[in-house]
Image (cartoon, helix red, strand yellow):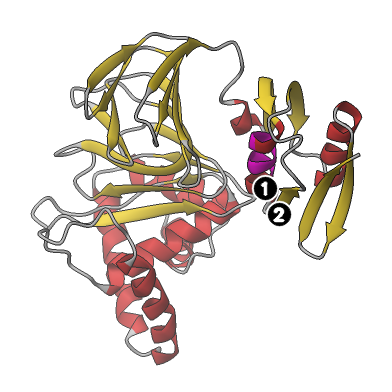
Amino acid sequence: MEEQLQHIKLLAFRYFEGKTSPEDAEVLFSFLKEGDFNPSLFRKWEDEWLSSLEFQPELNERWEKIKLANRNTEFIKKSIPVVKSYRNYVYAAVSIALLIIGSIVAFISIQDHQPEQYFTLETPLGQKSKITMPDGTLVWLNSGSSLIYSNKYGKGNREVKLSGEAYFEVKKGPKKFIVQINGYSVTVKGTKFNVSAYSDDQLLTTTLLEGRVEFNYMQGSLEMAPGETMEMNLKTNSIMRKKTGQSVNSWTRNRLDYGNIELEELLKKLSREYARTILLDGDLLKKQSFSISIDTNKDLADVLNAIAEIIPIKIINQNDTIKLKPI
């Protein structure tokens, strides 16, 4: 028993350092769920690890970089007191490390009486992440996306702020689940839906797969039904509702399936997916639309060659940029 406990403690220290493998993380989180005393022991180990950092001044630069990143978080309101401590920066560093590895479990244990604090989960371009929120809600974050939530999540609220694209499978509960996006919001109680709201996109798109959601905007609110897509034009504030037959969450399975998509829009999605700059030379083919199904496990070169079979284009590689020219 003692040897097993020492092994768990070692995994915990690796977790605090952001060096845990997905398999070790599963063992650690299973331990936390097994007994009422285990979370307290986990916090004790954390305090022990944090105390050891006081004698490692070479880590200061690391924390400063994380603090600088935290200052750029728009969701933190100036009127809310935010406690900045090494513990917060450790959690941020660990979250980022595990997101880069792949699927993570979002676990932050904070007492109710502490001031409200916000945490950001980010997925770099070219990668995706699967997150389990404290209430059991599952979130898939697409490339170049971020999700912000507070230490009150699951207690005082179930509210998150999204930038980019995410697919949600919301755990049913008494508190409404709210996604904030660019001044708009989607409210649900238990459902499956996809939201796309990248900062460089003109359209904010919500697609409901199961259950019911309410889209709230300045002029009012709209209730959506399963199989329905709502598109909000952020420039004109106009809304279009339509039935969707495409698999909008296929990206969570490393696929991009579109029944009808313009070339310009597809290239933007591929740029995020593969973390490469892909430009279309001229305006001639920008609005060219077609249907396509892409396996994103394949190399980008193979994908572009497949597109060239559909649309007459020439592929030109220029350092880190790929240009497509009409033939």
Q: Residues within 10 Å of mark 2 (few under 14, many from 20)?
A: some
Which residue is found at the position 67% from the left and 47% from the top? Answer: 271
Which residue is found at the position 54% from the left and 50% from the top? Answer: 144
State the image coordinates of residue 230 (x, y, percent, origin top left).
Answer: 42, 19
Q: Is residue 123 above or below residue 60?
A: above
Horizontal side of 11 relative to 311 (left or right) equals left
State the image coordinates of residue 118 (x, y, percent, origin top left).
Answer: 26, 55
Q: Is residue 111 magenta?
A: no
| Secondary structure category for the residue under label 2 | loop
Which residue is found at the position 64% from the left and 30% from the top? Answer: 253
Task: Give the magenta range.
Answer: 265-270
Q: Is residue 240 above or below residue 9?
A: above
| Secondary structure category for the residue under label 1 | helix
Which residue is found at the position 11% from the left and 63% from the top? Answer: 81
Task: Classify the position of the N terminus by image quarter.
Answer: bottom left
Chain-order first, disc 1 or disc 2: 1
Foreground of the two, 252 or 171:
252
Q: Amino acid at mark 2?
A: Arg
Tell me if I can see residue 8 in this picture.
no
Which residue is under mark 1?
Answer: 271
Tags 1 and 2 touching, CB below 8 Å: yes
Tell me if I can see residue 29 in this picture.
yes
State the image coordinates of residue 222 (x, y, percent, origin top left).
Answer: 28, 16
Q: Is residue 304 above or below residue 288?
A: below
Q: CA distance from mark 1 to mark 2?
A: 5 Å
Which residue is under mark 2?
Answer: 276
Task: Classify the position of the C terminus by image quarter.
Answer: top right
Dominant SS type (magenta): helix
Foreground of the two, 258 or 12:
258
